[in-house]
Amino acid sequence: MGFRVGRSGARLVIGKASVLMAEKRLMRQASARQSGRVSQRLTAAAVAIISGIAASPVPATAADPDYAAERAAMIRTIATYSAEVSLATGRDRIGEEVLEAMGIVPRHEFVPEDVRHQAYADRPLPIGYGQTISQPFIVAIMTDLLQVALNHVVLEIGTGSGYQAAVLAHLARQVYTIEIIPGLANGAAQRLQRLGYANVATRAGDGYYGWAEAAPFDGIIVTAAASQIPPPLIQQLKTGGRMVIPIGAPFALQHLVLVEVDDERKVRTRQLLPVQFVPLAGQH
């Protein structure tokens, strides 16, 4: 059996019981790869905003078919509340380039028609094949931590509908993204091509082993929890590169971990946010 990676619906935890119950229902229905959950102590204010934006997305109108108002509201939420996790992430705010990229990418193109009206709400949404698209805030945090530059080559593990890859494409020279579910991989490839993302390469495959022929990478994003950092991904990370990955035992307390490789190829790790992600499956 291979290492199974699909696109997930990571999100920060919401303190209200009703919203938690709704998320549990979504996770059961979607069998999401990850469910990011940051402790209330670290993100009390962020929790309140997440609840608010999820409950009251800006409705699309016939005069606004491109969802510009919703996209702007999403960006304001991310920008305003990113400071609430600054002590944990070591970043004062989400970088302007990340916010700009997320303000450009048409998230509604990456979700099914029947949930497009919720595309910019700060919540995961189902995308088929038992998978979900991740919450915008967690996408922003993980992208920001990579500190992507215009000359960078980046690897994403878990393509899903292609949204994260599209965000990265605005920041990096080249993006490689792997999805183990062929239907999602094919759909994402067609969608990214249709939307003009010529600097994204997709393939169906086992993400645990990375994409050796395209290595080394300046940055790697992994979207489900592993018990340890996969050695193939460390090997494929460029000197001076960064990886963002949730680490921990299945269905237990995990941490979002920043991995860096220094000039002597020594690996440095830093625990950032306490999270809870669905584990990466398979034998490896």
Image (spheres, grey):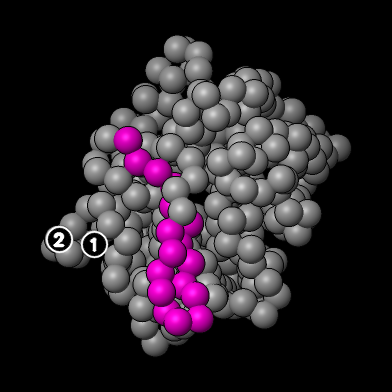
Look at the image and tell me in which quarter the N terminus lies: bottom left
Query: Please, what secondary structure does the residue beneath circle 2 have?
Result: loop
* Residue 183, picture quadrant: bottom left
User: Which stretch is magenta?
Assistant: 253-269
Please say whether residue 140 is one of the residues in the magenta stretch: no
Side (left or right) of 26 relative to 172: left
Between 259 and 224, the one nearer to me in the picture: 259
Between 281 and 237, the one nearer to me in the picture: 237
Tag 1: amino acid: Phe
The answer to whether residue 228 is above or below residue 213 is above
The structure residue drawn at horizontal position 23% and vertical position 62%, both measured from the top left corner, is: 3
Look at the image and tell me in which quarter the C terminus lies: bottom left
Reading the image, the residue beneath label 1 is 3
How many numbered callouts?
2
Q: Where in the figure is residue 83, as x and y percent of width and height?
A: 70, 37
Q: Where in the figure is residue 114, as x and y percent of width and height?
A: 54, 36
The structure residue drawn at horizontal position 72% and vertical position 45%, both measured from the top left corner, is: 93
User: In 3D space, how far apart are the residues under numbered discs 2 and 1 (Cα atoms)?
Assistant: 6 Å
Q: Where in the figure is residue 249, as x and y percent of width and height?
A: 24, 43
| Residue density around tag 1, few if under 14, some if 14–19, many if 20 or more, within 10 Å | some
Tag 2: amino acid: Gln
The structure residue drawn at horizontal position 35% and vertical position 46%, both measured from the top left corner, is: 33
Dot 2 or dot 1: first in sequence order is: 1
Contact (Cβ within 8 Å) of mark 2 with mark 1: yes
The answer to whether residue 55 is above or below residue 32 is above
The structure residue drawn at horizontal position 36% and vertical position 71%, both measured from the top left corner, is: 233
